[in-house]
Image: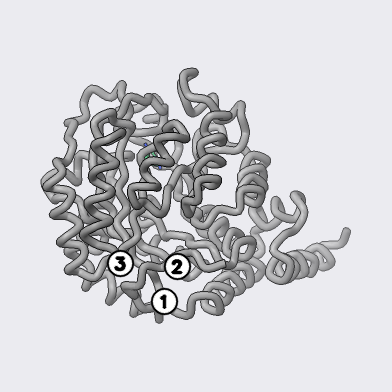
């Protein structure tokens, strides 16, 4: 095929993705690898317009509370893995978490996201009680959990206690890759089963993956997109893999900003209504990473509401940002930055609307 035909064809592919939400695997690969600057601009522009059409220039905020960095898992990529003995472990008390919610509520947050390592303390009855207390105190807020894998029964109890949303990245849709990122105790099938269980229970479900995780291949990314297509999650979180010096992947190369942004654009065209955050990892890899994510179709930011004394301890990767515009107390500055690119932060709960 001549160079000119090829050039034109990629614009057809982008238009097709925009209009039909799905293209072939080969076309997805082409979109991920093309060096054609005009085509990349067109992809980002169409994704941006898709988000503008769906959400206007409004960006939802979520208050992130990192409730514990204890973890019994040993994911090879993660800075708070069990085997990292250098981590100063902490777990927030019930009062500290409630005070984060109170501070967040005053600042205008209407979604609280509680995330942690897999910690037996913030599980079971104790977590259920915490969720129901937050539900009673803030009936107008959404409660999002990101606490890892649990039995279906436990997920059900948290849902019944008042949690609305659950974030659990599938990490990779290729089994052999999953096994290179995790120790043998963790199972690819179980991760997927958890997502199906969450969905069946009625949670708004978020999934996603790291971009550029060690051993990732182009084919695996296509599989990730196909997996998400089958799951049709309400939220999709992706961010670049960033290495942590005290993990087995200390020497692995970081994921790419450009590829992450391009994937956000593809995801936006595939999932026009999904809530797609400009993640902390994106804001860490480049100072304007969040803005670039928004300009490629992301529509959520998640500033950190955790107590300042503990923030540096939830270090999933080196140099993870936790202050300034990333933090709840820097909200005004974040608003200004978002305004500078033509968008506005709003305090609405921002549920998925089908
Ligand atoms: N324990 C819960 C779980 O497994 O879902 C929630 C906490 S876990 C630390 C949250 C996410 O952080 C993971 O799903 C993973 O994708 C991301 N993460 C961990 N280490 C990372 C790294 N080195 N670079 C980028 N993202 C990372």
Q: In the rendering, at what x and y percent does residue 146 appear?
A: 37, 44
Which residue is located at x 56 percent, y 59 percent? 262
Q: In the rendering, at what x and y percent does residue 237 appear?
A: 47, 52
Report the side of 32 relative to 326 (left or right). Answer: right
Q: Depth-wise, is mark 3 or mark 2 nearer the camera?
A: 3
Which residue is located at x 44 percent, y 34 percent? 153
Mark 1, residue position? 58
Ligand 1 falls in quadrant? top left
Mark 3 vs 2, N-terminal side: 3
Please tell me which residue lies in front, 124 or 88.
Answer: 124
Q: Secondary structure at mark 2?
A: loop
Residue density around tag 2, few if under 14, some if 14–19, many if 20 or more, within 10 Å? many
Task: Find residue 303 and report its image quarter.
Answer: bottom left
Q: CA distance from mark 3 to mark 1?
A: 19 Å
Mark 2, residue position? 299
Please tell me which residue lies in front, 354 or 80.
Answer: 354
Mark 3 vs 1, N-terminal side: 1
Mark 3, residue position? 140
Which residue is located at x 56 percent, y 34 percent? 193
Mark 2 vs 1, N-terminal side: 1
Report the side of 93 relative to 213 (left or right). Answer: left
């Amino acid at each position: 095929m001549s160079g000119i035909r090829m050039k034109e064809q990629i614009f057809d592919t982008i238009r097709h993705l925009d209009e039909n939400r799905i293209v072939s695997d080969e076309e997805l690969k082409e979109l991920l690898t093309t060096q054609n600057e005009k085509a990349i601009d067109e992809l980002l522009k169409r994704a941006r317009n898709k988000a503008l059409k769906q959400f206007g220039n409004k960006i939802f905020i979520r208050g992130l509370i990192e409730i514990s960095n204890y973890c019994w898992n040993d994911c090879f990529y993660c800075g708070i893995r069990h085997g990292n003995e250098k981590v100063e472990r902490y777990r927030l008390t019930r009062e500290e978490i409630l005070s984060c919610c109170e501070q967040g509520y005053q600042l205008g947050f209407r979604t609280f996201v509680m995330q942690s390592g897999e910690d037996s303390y913030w599980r079971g009855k104790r977590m259920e009680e915490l969720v129901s207390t937050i539900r009673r105190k803030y009936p107008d807020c959404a409660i999002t959990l990101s606490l890892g894998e649990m039995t279906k029964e436990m997920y059900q109890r948290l849902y019944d206690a008042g949690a609305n949303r659950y974030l659990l990245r599938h990490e990779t849709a290729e089994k052999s890759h999953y096994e290179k990122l995790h120790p043998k105790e963790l199972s690819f099938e179980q991760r997927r089963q958890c997502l199906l269980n969450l969905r069946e229970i009625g949670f708004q479900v978020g999934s996603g993956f790291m971009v550029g995780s060690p051993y990732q291949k182009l084919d695996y990314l296509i599989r990730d997109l196909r997996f998400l297509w089958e799951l049709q999650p309400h939220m999709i979180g992706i961010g670049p893999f960033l290495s942590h010096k005290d993990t087995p992947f200390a020497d692995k190369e970081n994921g790419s900003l450009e590829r992450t942004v391009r994937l956000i654009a593809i995801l936006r065209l595939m999932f026009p209504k999904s809530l797609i955050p400009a993640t902390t990892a994106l804001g860490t890899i480049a100072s304007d990473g969040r803005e670039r994510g928004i300009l490629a179709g992301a529509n959520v930011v998640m500033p950190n509401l955790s107590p300042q004394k503990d923030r540096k301890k939830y270090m999933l990767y080196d140099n993870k940002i936790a202050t300034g515009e990333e933090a709840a107390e820097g909200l005004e500055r974040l608003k200004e930055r978002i305004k500078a690119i033509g968008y506005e932060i709003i305090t609405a709960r921002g549920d998925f609307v089908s």
